[in-house]
């Protein structure tokens, strides 16, 4: 009698041992992301709302970029980024004041960074980015776009003059 092919359960189980985790691990990660995003309220840092980038000229506060006082020692700085400039590109702020920065983009993804501070935003069309900063030391602080946005990227900068 001819011998039949040997029974081969082991390779199948071995494959299964790899296939199951390769399904289970991404599924568990996806579930964790969904729980974090919706259950725990965790989202992209600095993203706080949406706005139609085609309607910025009619939509407060982006219809009037710049610094406005909202309370004693408390200001809002509204920034509109576009290729390749910031509006405004020069701001004077009293030292020690709380400054709420609200930024968006008119066109492509830009960045807004003030080196030496906590300010480091992705400025995405359609999204409103927010952060808060206090300048304790008088002086001139440069800000710039730190997301590559085309040939004029290096022109996208401005300054905040903190007055003591
Ligand atoms: Cu805007 Cu780089």
Image: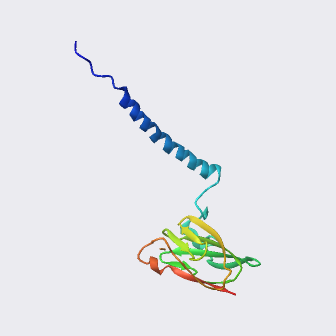
* Residue 4 visible (yes or no): yes
Q: Is residue 80 left or right of residue 67?
A: left
User: Residue 4 or 92: which is nearer the viewer?
Assistant: 4
Q: As rendered, which of 93 and 11 lies closer to the eye?
A: 11
On screen, residue 96 versus residue 122, left or right, reads right
Q: Residue at x 50, y 71 (%)?
A: 110
Q: Residue furthest left?
A: 1
Q: Residue 17, located in which quarter of the rendered image?
A: top left
Residue drawn at the location 62% of the way across and 50% of the way down: 38
Q: Position of residue 7 (x, y in %)?
A: 33, 22
Residue 34 point in image, percent of width and height: 58, 48
Locate residue 144, reporting x and y percent: 52, 77
Q: Does 10 appear above or below 111?
A: above
Horizontal and vertical percent position of residue 60: 64, 71
Identify which residue is drawn at 55% across, 82% down: 158
Q: Residue sitting at 56 percent across and 50 percent down? A: 33
Say which quadrant the C terminus sits in.
Answer: bottom right
Q: Identify the colour scheme used.
A: rainbow
**130 above or below 68?**
above
Q: Quadrant of the N terminus?
A: top left
Q: Residue furthest right?
A: 72
């Amino acid at each position: 009698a001819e011998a039949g092919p040997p029974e081969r359960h082991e390779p199948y189980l071995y494959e299964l041992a790899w296939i199951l985790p390769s399904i289970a691990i991404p599924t568990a990660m996806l579930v964790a992301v969904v729980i974090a995003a919706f259950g725990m309220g965790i989202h992209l840092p600095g993203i706080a709302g949406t706005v139609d980038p085609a309607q910025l000229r009619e939509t407060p506060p982006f219809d009037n970029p710049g610094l406005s006082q909202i309370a004693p020692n408390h200001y809002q700085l509204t920034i509109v980024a576009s290729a390749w400039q910031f509006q405004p590109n020069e701001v004077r702020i009293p030292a020690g004041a709380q400054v709420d920065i609200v930024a968006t983009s008119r066109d492509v993804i830009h960045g807004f960074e003030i080196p030496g501070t906590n300010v480091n935003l992705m400025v995405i069309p359609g999204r409103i980015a927010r952060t808060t900063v206090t300048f304790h030391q008088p002086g001139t602080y440069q800000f710039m776009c730190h997301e590559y946005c085309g040939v004029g990227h290096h022109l996208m900068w401005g300054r905040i003059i903190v007055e003591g």
